[in-house]
Image: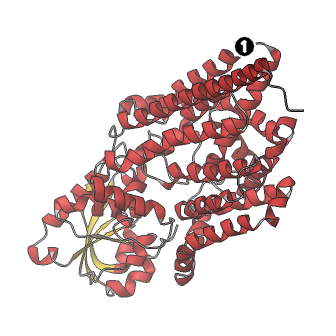
Amino acid sequence: MGKRFDPAGSHSANLQYATREETDARGWSIAAAFAAAACALHLLFVGRYGYFRDELYFAVCGSHLAWGYVDVAPLITWIAHCVRTLFGNSLVSLRFLPALSSGAKILLTAWIVRGFGGGRYAQLLAATLMFFCPIYLIMDGYLSMNSFEPLFWMGAVAMAMRIMSGGSPRLWLLFGALSGFGILNKYSMLLFGLALVLGLLVTTGFRYFRNPWIWLGALIALVIFLPNLLWQVSNHFPTIEQLSNSRITKNAYVPWYAFIAEQAVLMLPLAVPVVLAGLWFLLADEEGRRYRFLGWTFVFLLLEMLVLHGQIYYMAPVYPMLFASGAVWIEGKITASGRSWVKAAIVVPLAAAGIISLPLEIPILPVDTLAAYAAFWDVNKVHVENFPLGKLPQQFADQFGWEGQAATVASVYQALPAADRSRCAILTGNYGEAAAVDYFGARFGLPQALSGHNEYYLWGPRGYSGDVVIAVGLQLGVLRSLFNDVQQAATIENVNAMPAENNLPVYLCRMPRTPLVQAWPRLRNFY
């Protein structure tokens, strides 16, 4: 006997399907609105202060395209090269893609929320957390691999979730491609990948290792990463040396308990309960059983960072999945309790706290007002590097003074006799000072800079003899060990810059004790 057609039942099913579609559409509308607002916010204040130290360096490295660099994976330099070629050297061109990435992270988080089964309120809560998350607001404000890193991590998570939900195992190929390019963006992708593999192995996810597609995905990741790996081998793994030196000389020591506690500053302190709820959902709640591997991924990643003494912001790319899982868990509890008023009681304080902290992450305020605001909140109490801090938080202080440095160096250079200018080298103490000369120097008629710091060391002395050198950022004792005649010619001043870049002497050096090419190994400085 054939199945009886039930019009009422069919109508009920259609209504449920329509309701689900409507809920999804509204959820995506919420995420899209937050994503657009995030992009607009960054673009609105894109040129408020100035160029950031690292983005100048990445831009210059982009003029020397290679499969590897001493202190950075190559993808960010390729991005810098492309945007400068297509759109020029302005701040807007350099920071356009990071601004877009702020919106992309919100949309990707919305996708993960939907994968966890979240509805409209979960989308609202997760989008609010993503929009006001301090570390993302900071990292999306300038060109950096940190801006794109969460997209690779969470893209891999989204693919793994889709596979766990019955998606095609061929998605492991896309997972592998995302992982490969994620490694080319930043090597921490290797740590995240290891944590995720361990998370799969200690849960029911271990069964996927019997599927050939996951191994093909791993092969794709290796093929993408291989040219960079070969570069590291041929250059004797300089990145490992640089990271090891940084841990000793550059990075601030943070004990394990402070590392964990300071995560709250990165994500917004009021977001901590949501993150803990997300961990509970992934590790203990029955509704999150299918995605238990993600909870263990977080645990293993945290252990890796503690063992390796990673900087506190190294955990930042993992938080979108915890914002998403926490939002879904909270939404479920509110729905079950029937206390809908709790929804606003959670979102409103989060938004208020985010608005209060916003000037500490986005260049909204005039400089003096920002300095007073930062002092009020004592933000310099949390720092990731061992350098003295000035009146501004480091992410803002490092946006001041670079063009002025190039101009001061140019004034010394232009004052030289023509015969000296033709053979004069510009030697700097770090890549920020060198990149400032290279990025802004063309308009002042400056030659390319030299430095023993990181990638600049590999570019060598560029054929200069060292007979005439303008030196910036090197200690006087070091210069006197290299030259018989060292005279101060100018001083670089910018009270808003990092203290190490303010009141900076510019020296004119002559009569080298040895040719520069022979002295070059003494200037080598990887940190």
Is 303 located above or below residue 74 in the figure? above
Q: Residue at x 52, y 78 (%)?
A: 231
Residue located farthest toward the front when viewing the structure as drawn: 1
Asked whether 224 or 280 is in front, the reply is 224
- In the figure, is residue 319 to the left or right of 336? left
Asked whether 303 or 453 is in front, the reply is 303
Q: Residues within 10 Å of mark 1 (few under 14, many from 20)?
A: few
Q: Residue at x 35, y 62 (%)?
A: 81
SS of the residue under disc 1 = loop
Which of the colour schemes (rainbow, by chain, secondary structure, one colour) is used? secondary structure
Q: Residue at x 42, y 49 (%)?
A: 499
**Residue 71, x across and y down, in percent:** 51, 67
Q: Give the quarter of the image for residue 522.
A: bottom left
**Residue 357, x across and y down, in percent:** 53, 29
- In the figure, is residue 17 to the left or right of 187? right
Q: Is residue 47 visible?
A: yes
Q: Residue at x 57, y 46 (%)?
A: 383
**Residue 492, x across and y down, in percent:** 29, 54
Residue located farthest toward the right when viewing the structure as drawn: 1
- In the figure, is residue 249 to the left or right of 462? right
Q: Give the quarter of the image for residue 350.
A: top right
Looking at the figure, which quarter contains the N terminus? top right
Is 255 located above or below residue 466 in the figure? above
* Residue bearing mark 1: 340
Q: Which amino acid lies under the numbered mark 1 shown in the image of this protein?
A: Ser
Q: Is residue 307 visible?
A: no
**Residue 265, x across and y down, in percent:** 62, 37
- Count numbered badges in the picture: 1
Q: Give the quarter of the image for residue 495.
A: top left
Asked whether 127 or 392 is in front, the reply is 127
Is 481 located above or below residue 335 in the figure? below
